[in-house]
Amino acid sequence: LMIVLLILLLLSIYVFIERILVLKKAGKEDQSFMNRIKDYIFDGKIDSAKMLCLNTDTVYSRMVEKGISRLGRPTTEVMSTIENAGNIEISRMEKGLAVLATTASGAPMIGFLGTVTGMVKAFMSMSSAPTLTMDVLSTGIYEALVTTVGGLIVGILALFGYNYLTTRIKGIVTTMETKIMEFMDILNEPVK
């Protein structure tokens, strides 16, 4: 069971580090992006706005690009297209989080399974031993305690990693929503 826990630990560490790198890239912001989009749209340079979106590698630039590609259509269609693009971006950011969530709940259960098997071994050793000594009991109890501790450590680390990543994703989603509302305001702003 400790081998299973070690595999889950290594898998969780891999997913956590990989997601941190993805979220770091997804969370970067270009402060002048929306102002340049606004200028391009008001100047009628739609192709320049699309190129800016394609050259700016952020989650919200990909969503704005989808919105720009629907310019001239009803606002509800533009917003629906942007929402669909946003859902795809969120799914990409959440990829792999199920592994952490499963490990967070499953690792302690595997540890408790080790507790039960260790106690079974201890009692089997007690029943077959001619005399009861600490050596007879200690092997099974040792296994029980080590697997419990291992399962809890792996589960706790996976849980903390999962919660940290979901919090980061929520922050990125808030930024996405802010930028999209800004974009929709640009579309609905009267031309001067």
Image (cartoon, helix red, strand yellow):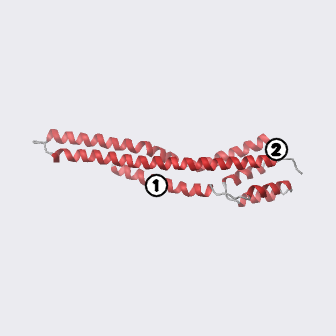
Q: Residue furthest left?
A: 130
Report crowding for label 2: few under 14, some 14 to 19, many 20 or more residues within 10 A (C-alpha).
few
The picture places residue 11, in percent across and down from the top left corner, at 45, 53
Q: Residue furthest right?
A: 192
Residue 19 appears in the picture as rendered: yes
Q: How many marks?
A: 2
The front one of 54 and 32 is 32
Label 2, label 1: how far apart the Cα atoms are: 46 Å
Mark 1 is on which residue type? Ile
Relative to 190, 6 lies left or right: left
The picture places residue 59, in percent across and down from the top left corner, at 66, 53
The picture places residue 164, in percent across and down from the top left corner, at 52, 49
The picture places residue 78, in percent across and down from the top left corner, at 77, 44
Residue 85 appears in the picture as rendered: no
Mark 2 is on which residue type? Arg
Residue lying at 20% horizontally and 46% vertically, measured from the top left? 138
Mark earlier in primary sequence (2, 1): 1
The front one of 191 and 114 is 191
Residue lying at 29% horizontally and 39% vertically, measured from the top left? 116
Q: Which residue is mark 2?
A: 73
* Secondary-structure class at tag 2: loop
The image shows residue 145, relative to residue 52, as above or below, that is: above
Q: Nearer the viewer, mark 2 or mark 1?
A: 1
Residue lying at 49% horizontally and 50% vertically, measured from the top left? 161
Relative to 99, 79 lies left or right: right
Q: Which mark is residue 56?
A: none
Q: Which mark is residue 13?
A: 1
Q: Residue furthest bottom?
A: 55
Report crowding for label 1: few under 14, some 14 to 19, many 20 or more residues within 10 A (C-alpha).
some
* Secondary-structure class at tag 1: helix
Residue lying at 16% horizontally and 46% vertically, measured from the top left? 134
